[in-house]
Image: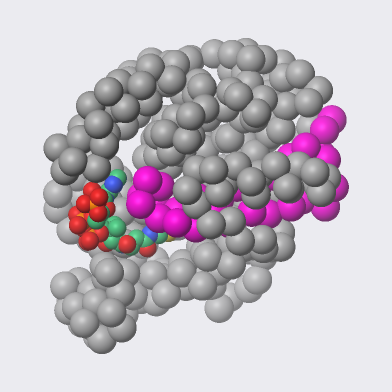
Amino acid sequence: MKTIMVVGAGQMGSGIAQVAAQAGYAVILNDIKDEFVQRGLQTIAKNLSRSVEKGKMEAAEKEAVLSRLKPSVALEDAAAADLVIEAAVENMAIKAEIFKQLDAVCPEATILATNTSSLPITEVAAVTKRPEKVIGMHFMNPVPVMKLVEVIRGLATDDAVYGEIEALSRKMGKTPVEVNDAPGFVANRILIPMINEAVWTLYEGIAGIEEIDQVMKLGMNHPMGPLTLADLIGLDTVLAICEVLHEGMGDKYRPCPLLRKYVKAGWLGRKTGRGFYQY
Ligand code: CAA
């Protein structure tokens, strides 16, 4: 495996592209608009500069990593990739369309992975003619920092493909953990109900935003409170995952109306400058 294309240059896609380039792969960073790709590349450059300033990376290494990243606004560029990792929005119709197009342009041997945080891998795989080469590769945010990758097989995923993705995850400095294809996998099945419960706690007036976060930080030693974390993930993504859990597993997972209201208002967290907090 030499060349990896990452589809989606947002916070997850740019993070994945960064760790892939740091692991020595040639990376094609793709999005629908050049401005999105450039924003992703700027984030990567900023992260690498910070590492250089802290003395954790040589300036020459930063330049080498950046030189391995190529911008793209055409999915056809996937024809040059040995692996595509899709990190577009958490929406099945959009992912299905991307996978159909990738399946049409990629050579037979290309592995197609999705960074979906909750959608069924088997369903994504089924829109392609290569379900045995489709797999879930779920990174955590912020990607350059978090060690976990959940690796999820679809019903038809080949063992050899699983093995390649497991080895790649390690090469990227991550620890792969195999989990089964079920709503939210493991990470989000446990995390998102906690965040949703924090929003219900706020909605019902039990405590304020900062108080809820303080309780979980100081009381449970979480590195950030659930509402701060929701702002980091993006409230649209939190809601989308919560909907998948609700649909797949029932009322226990019903999204709090306040979460919906924030998303409708366009208060999506850090990325829009306002969520539970203002940035
Ligand atoms: N990108 C790259 N690097 C980042 C970063 C970012 N966005 N944010 C922080 N870092 C780096 C810093 O540069 C710093 O690096 P060094 O150790 O090399 O100096 C390191 O991370 C620690 O950062 P800080 O000292 O600034 O702050 P911190 O100690 O509070 O850590 C944090 C920040 C790592 C984000 C920490 O608060 C944390 O672990 N939070 C929880 C994150 C979490 O739960 N993520 C999972 C989200 S769920 C998910 O992603 C799944 C999904 O599908 C929704």
Q: Quadrant of residue 42?
A: top left
Q: Is residue 224 above or below residue 200?
A: above
Q: Position of residue 216 (x, y in %)?
A: 28, 79
In reply to whether residue 181 is colored magenta, the answer given is no
Q: Position of residue 262 (x, y in %)?
A: 31, 56
Count numbered badges in the picture: 0
Ligand 1 appears in which quadrant?
A: bottom left
**Image quadrant where one finds the N terminus:** top right
Q: How is the image coloured?
A: one colour
Front residue of this view, candidates 5 and 189: 5
Residue 265 is at least partly visible in this image: no
Front residue of this view, candidates 103 and 273: 103
Q: Which residues are magenta?
A: 129-156
Q: Is residue 113 left or right of residue 270?
A: right
Residue 141 is at least partly visible in this image: yes
In reply to whether residue 154 is colored magenta, the answer given is yes
Q: Quadrant of residue 245?
A: bottom right
